[in-house]
Image (spheres, rainbow, N blue to C red):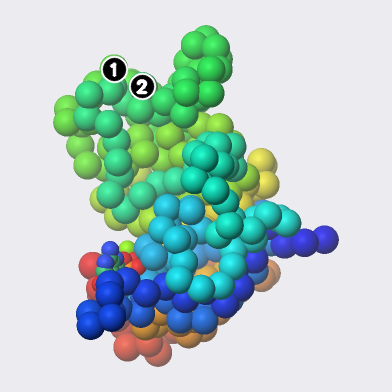
Amino acid sequence: MNPLLSIENIDKYYGTKNNITKALSHVSFVVEEGDFLGIMGASGSGKTTLLNAIATINPVSAGHIYLGDKDITDLKKDELADFRMNNLGFVFQELNLLDNFTLEENIGLALALRGVAPKEINMLVQKAAGMLGIGDLLKKFPAEVSGGQRQRCACARAIINHPKLILADEPTGALDSRSAQMLLECFTDLNQTLKATILMVTHDVFTASYCSRILFLRDGKIFNEIRKGDKTRRMFFQEILDVVTLMGGDVSNAK
Ligand SMILES: Nc1ncnc2c1ncn2[C@@H]1O[C@H](COP(=O)(O)OP(=O)(O)OP(=O)(O)O)[C@@H](O)[C@H]1O
Ligand SMILES: [Mg+2]
């Protein structure tokens, strides 16, 4: 069987000739269906660039990304929106909530755009918001809730249509430990019960310890990879911490 996602030798450059940044260099890996993959690395190591390339938001300079058999670096402009809506759920580092929409409207937007019936949307919004503990804030606007509540809203929006692939960039960044744990348990639940495949960027070792596998990026290249296997979360936490220490501690201190 083909892996869900194959990243084949991608490069990403920003800028022009005289002012060029090589953000990703010969990055290759595969993600199997049901993986919960963490991506760690210091600030500027290329994590967001990698996630946005997979999200088809930011084109690669070289290489290919396959979702199943489909080369998504090859999608035409008019195919992109449909592709994202049908396959992906994102939580961006900048949350991208719409200020003039309530949390409820923000969470349900993709479904409304697809023409799902309002009753059905309402039920799914309630369910996702409930899982993330923001069920009683749905009539509020983003500016009327806290940063962590906005973050949970962005996560609810990402999971609402049970996407095949969830891409999350620092989803626990603004959360206190209880809310972070709630979100991580929600991701774990989606991963285990719905077999959602998750790619999550994080600086935080505790957050990373929920993953089944971690890739470490350094200067745009894969530096190391570890798997949880049969280890307990506590043992995996220690192992992640050891790699972070080996990398000079600049993964978790980068924030
Ligand atoms: N739009 C852009 N134009 C030019 N350079 C960019 C752009 N976006 C990112 N870069 C550069 O590419 C490199 C990788 O950036 P990226 O945002 O992927 O890092 P990151 O690992 O997500 O960092 P952080 O942990 O701070 O979010 C950095 O050197 C960054 O300065
Ligand atoms: Mg980033």
Kindly indicate the quadrant of the structure image that contains residue 147.
Answer: top left
Q: Residues within 10 Å of mark 1 (few under 14, many from 20)?
A: few
Q: Quadrant of residue 205?
A: bottom left
**Left or right of 79 on screen, residue 46:** left
- The residue shown at (28%, 75%) is 16
- Amino acid found under the numbered disc labelled 2: Glu
CA separation in Å, label 1 and label 2: 9 Å
> Residue 105, labelled with which disc?
2
Residue 170: give x, y in percent of width and height.
35, 57
Task: Give percent across and percent down for residue 36.
Answer: 58, 58
Earlier sequence position, callout 1 versus callout 2:
2
- From the image, which quarter does the C terminus lie in? bottom left
Which quadrant is the N terminus positioned in?
A: bottom right
- Report whether residue 137 is seen: no
Disc 2 Cβ-to-ligand 2 distance below 8 Å: no
Tag shown at residue 40: none
* Residue shown at the point (47%, 23%) measured from the top left: 113
Question: Badge 1 is on which residue?
Answer: 139
Number of the front mark, 1 or 2: 2
Q: Residue 218: horizontal and vertical position, in percent?
A: 39, 82
